[in-house]
Image (cartoon, rainbow, N blue to C red):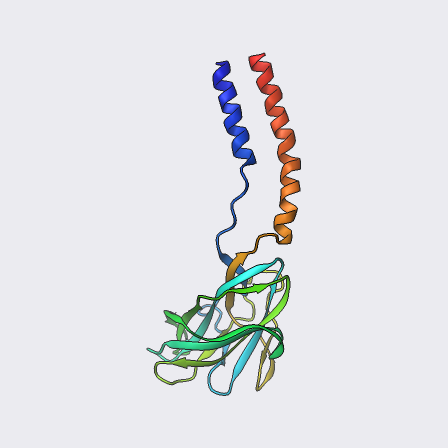
């Protein structure tokens, strides 16, 4: 019985002090739900038109991709989009940019007769410290050479600090925000990770001491 209790104690202690695994890549910033259901309007990101939206990150991160939702003519598909991540709307410090191939997935038809598609950009590696940034989309090209529109959701059901995004159209000025998310991972050494270790030690230390005391009572 004593040997069994000692073994259980050692196993429990080992589990408690195993370092936490790094989080899997996920959503860093979520600006809310796309149409359908929130079909307010949409803003062109092809031709001479382009749109920028703000996003906030609270730790050091690596952006690996993003998703945005579009209104498209039936049967159309976005092939590529030019994107920029910068410090200011339409300018400032440019952290990364590119004209990138996209993955386009049809979600459904809205009440205005447009296809609603989820457009995905992958393969990025953009390191950002905590702060507010702007993602700009323009020069979207498609299979049928029709206009492409970025879905306006006005921040409906957004879940991230700093949302809903502020947004601008280069021809109009201030507009409601669009539906998009930014994906990636938290970088090692960010503030959240540094702050978690002391807290974990303060919590688990008394727990281990209590377990040791209980074990001595049973086996002593």
* Residue 21 vertical position relative to residue 5 in the rendered view, above or below: below
Q: Residue at x 52, y 29 (%)?
A: 12
Q: Position of residue 141 (x, y in %)?
A: 41, 81
* Residue at (57, 87) in percent of width and height: 171
Q: Return the x and y of residue 94 as percentages of the image width and height.
A: 59, 74
Q: Nearer the viewer, residue 167 or 184?
A: 184
Q: Is residue 189 visible?
A: yes
Q: Quadrant of residue 70?
A: bottom left
Kindly give the residue lying farthest to the top in the view shown: 220
Q: x, y percentage for residue 147?
A: 43, 84
Against 2, residue 8 (above or below) is below
Looking at this view, name the residue that lies furthest to the left: 75
94 with respect to 36 (left or right): right
User: Left or right: where does residue 14 sit relative to residue 194?
Assistant: left
User: Is 34 placed above or below 17 here?
Assistant: below
Residue 89 or 85: which is nearer the viewer?
Answer: 85
* Residue 210 x, y percent position in the rendering: 62, 25
Q: Is residue 213 above or below residue 57?
A: above
Quarter of the image containing the C terminus?
top right
- Give the residue drawn at x 38%, y 71%: 104
> Foreground: 82 or 114?
82
């Amino acid at each position: 019985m004593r040997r069994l209790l000692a073994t259980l104690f050692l196993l429990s202690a080992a589990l408690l002090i195993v370092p936490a695994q790094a989080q899997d890549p996920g959503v860093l910033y979520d600006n809310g739900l796309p149409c359908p259901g929130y079909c307010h309007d949409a803003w062109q990101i092809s031709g001479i038109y382009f749109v920028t939206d703000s996003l906030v990150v609270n730790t050091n991160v690596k952006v690996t991709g993003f998703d945005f939702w579009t209104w498209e003519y039936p049967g159309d598909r976005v092939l590529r989009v030019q994107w920029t991540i910068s410090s200011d709307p339409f300018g400032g410090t440019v952290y990364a940019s590119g004209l990138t191939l996209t993955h386009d997935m049809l979600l459904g038809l809205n009440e205005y007769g447009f296809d609603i598609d989820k457009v995905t950009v992958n393969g990025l590696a953009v390191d950002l410290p905590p702060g507010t940034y702007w993602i700009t989309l323009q020069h979207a090209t498609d299979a049928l050479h029709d206009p492409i529109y970025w879905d306006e959701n006005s921040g409906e059901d957004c879940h991230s600090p700093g949302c809903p995004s502020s947004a601008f159209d280069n021809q109009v000025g201030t507009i409601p925000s669009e539906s998009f998310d930014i994906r990636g991972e938290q970088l090692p050494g960010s503030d959240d990770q540094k702050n978690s270790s002391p807290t974990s030690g303060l919590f688990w230390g008394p727990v281990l001491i209590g377990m040791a005391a209980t074990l001595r009572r049973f086996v002593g």
